[in-house]
Image (tube, helix red, strand yellow):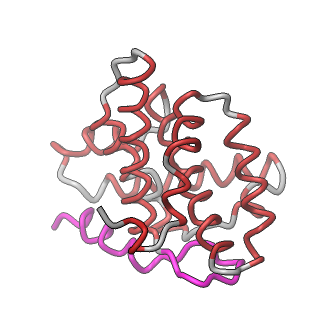
Amino acid sequence: MDKFFAFLYRTKYINRWGLMRNTEKENLMEHSFLTAVVAHALAEISNAFFGNRLDAERIAAKALFHDVSEIFTGDMPTPVKYLNPDLKQNYKAVEKLAADKLVEQLPEKLQSVYADLLDEGGEEHVFVKYADKLCAYIKCVKEVQFGNTEFVSAKASIFKELKGYDSREVDYFLDNCIEAFTLTLDELRL
């Protein structure tokens, strides 16, 4: 019996931002979808405005699967995950082991396809990382907009990190897309 996709279904039960009071809960399934959308957008921005030839669909697929190891590990809060270099390295090893165990749930003929999507190497993964961080920033923007001061510090810290990437694609997204996330439905009306 192939269990891989049943495990993926369970991403909706893994809540993010566990150490912080949230006005709006976010689960891993929601986060993965938005990360894939943003990663795809970053790749297309790179192609359209900066002359690159990235495979936006592949980058989106990698983003869709970027946190699936959390099915087994749960969402480790960032301050804990990066508390010290040893913990960070050990947690990366646990994530890799979890991803490998997940891939083993597939028929052998599909394992290499999904193992490749879960691989965190290469230029494609850089765009997934950027998208993941932008989604964290969007979460902070929304929480602060709702009056949740719990996210003020995280918002500032993540913004600084995003600017530190020195990425034209990230800067384009920040300059042209983020403000729309603060609009109401009436303001978003076509």
Asked which quadrant contains residue 17, the reply is bottom right
Outermost top residue: 51
Left or right of 74 in this view: 101: left
Q: Give the range drawn in magenta.
A: 1-26
x and y percent of residue 163 in the render? 70, 38
Looking at the picture, how far across and down is residue 2, in whole percent?
19, 64
- Is residue 117 covered in magenta? no
Residue 91 picture location, percent across and down:
65, 55
Give the total of numbered labels. 0
Label the magenta part by its dominant secondary structure.
loop
- Residue furthest to the right: 84
- The residue positioned 39% from the left and 76% from the top of the image is 12
Can residue 13 be found in the magenta stretch? yes
Check the picture and name the quadrant holding the C terminus.
Answer: bottom left
Residue at left 49%, top 67%?
A: 183
Instruction: Pick the residue in front: 23 or 118.
Output: 23
Residue 62 lies, with reference to residue 179, above or below; the image says above
Compared to residue 124, the image places residue 71 above or below, namely below
Q: Which of 186 and 3 lies nearest the eye of the viewer?
A: 186
Point out the image quarter for the N terminus.
bottom left
Residue at (40, 56) in percent of width and height: 101
x%, y% of residue 15? 52, 77
Work out whether 149 lies above or below 84.
below
* Residue drawn at x 77%, y 56% as measured from the top left: 156
Report the front residue among 55 and 77: 55
Q: Pick the residue in front: 103 or 128.
A: 128
Quarter of the view holding residue 118 = top left
